[in-house]
Image (cartoon, grey):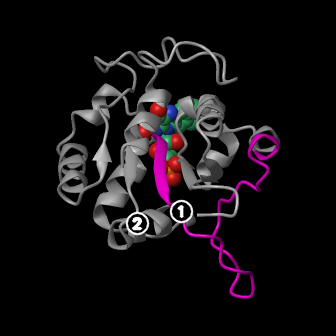
Amino acid sequence: MTESGRLLYVIVCAAGAARDVGRLVALALDDGWVVQVVTTPSALEFVDVPALEWRTGRPVRSRYRRPDEPKPPRADAIIVAPATYNTVNKFAQGVADTYALGLLAEAPGLGIPVVVLPFVNEALATRVPFRRSVESLRAEGVHVLPNHGPGSPEPGLAGAGDGDGDGNRENDPWALALKEISRK
Ligand SMILES: Cc1cc2nc3c(=O)[nH]c(=O)nc-3n(C[C@H](O)[C@H](O)[C@H](O)COP(=O)(O)O)c2cc1C
């Protein structure tokens, strides 16, 4: 919790859909969240960092702090969107080799609710390791939404608007993730 409200961490992975994460940020701000964007190191190249910083009023973070830097405030809730095959598998295994994964590694133990919105292509989503990771995360209380990657039966980014926070929330995976985290 910050002075201005509940703090939502949006963790962005290096999937093509990351370019549209401004949509999720705008919806969350509209709903009254304070939003902190964290990207994996690879995802930094997929997002418009200045635009996200302007929108949230907070620096986009992608690396662990230096030991002499102050500790950032703890998240009240976390959405991982888009979540890649790589990050979903590493999260399930407890790997913490990036700042984003470090936050996720601690979240279940701290009781911080986490919603994961996978964007994984069909070839990877059908792999046993990925299906096991999803099962194992769900068993730990992590809310993993259906995969919205290419070839999945889900509606993908159809109806997801233009990133300005307007448009129809129905069939919008970003709005779905936000709805689920708001229930926690
Ligand atoms: C243009 C592009 C689009 C990609 N889209 C996806 C995607 O939708 N889902 C996915 O799991 N990986 C995707 N990848 C592969 C990931 O970027 C790669 O696995 C990376 O290691 C993920 O790192 P991260 O999980 O730390 O963000 C994409 C790669 C490129 C170059």
- Which of 2 and 120 lies nearest the eye of the viewer? 2
Give the residue at mark 2.
107
Look at 55% across and 42% down and name the residue there.
14
Which label was assigned to residue 75?
A: 1
Dot 1: element: loop
Q: Amino acid at mark 1?
A: Ala
Range drawn in magenta: 53-82
Q: Is residue 78 left or right of residue 59?
A: left
Mark 2 or mark 1, earlier in chain: 1
Q: Is residue 106 left or right of residue 49?
A: left
Look at 22% across and 51% down and name the residue there.
138
Q: Residue 30: x percent and y percent?
A: 64, 34
- Which of 175 and 138 lies nearest the eye of the viewer? 175
Q: Residue 104: x percent and y percent?
A: 43, 62
Q: Is residue 46 left or right of residue 141?
A: right
The reply to whether the magenta stretch includes residue 78 is yes
Q: Residue 174: x percent and y percent?
A: 49, 30
Which label was assigned to residue 96?
A: none
The main secondary structure of the magenta stretch is loop
Disc 2 to disc 1: CB gap under 8 Å: yes
Look at 74% across and 88% down and name the residue there.
68
- Which of 76 and 140 lies nearest the eye of the viewer? 76
Q: Is residue 17 above or below residue 106?
A: above
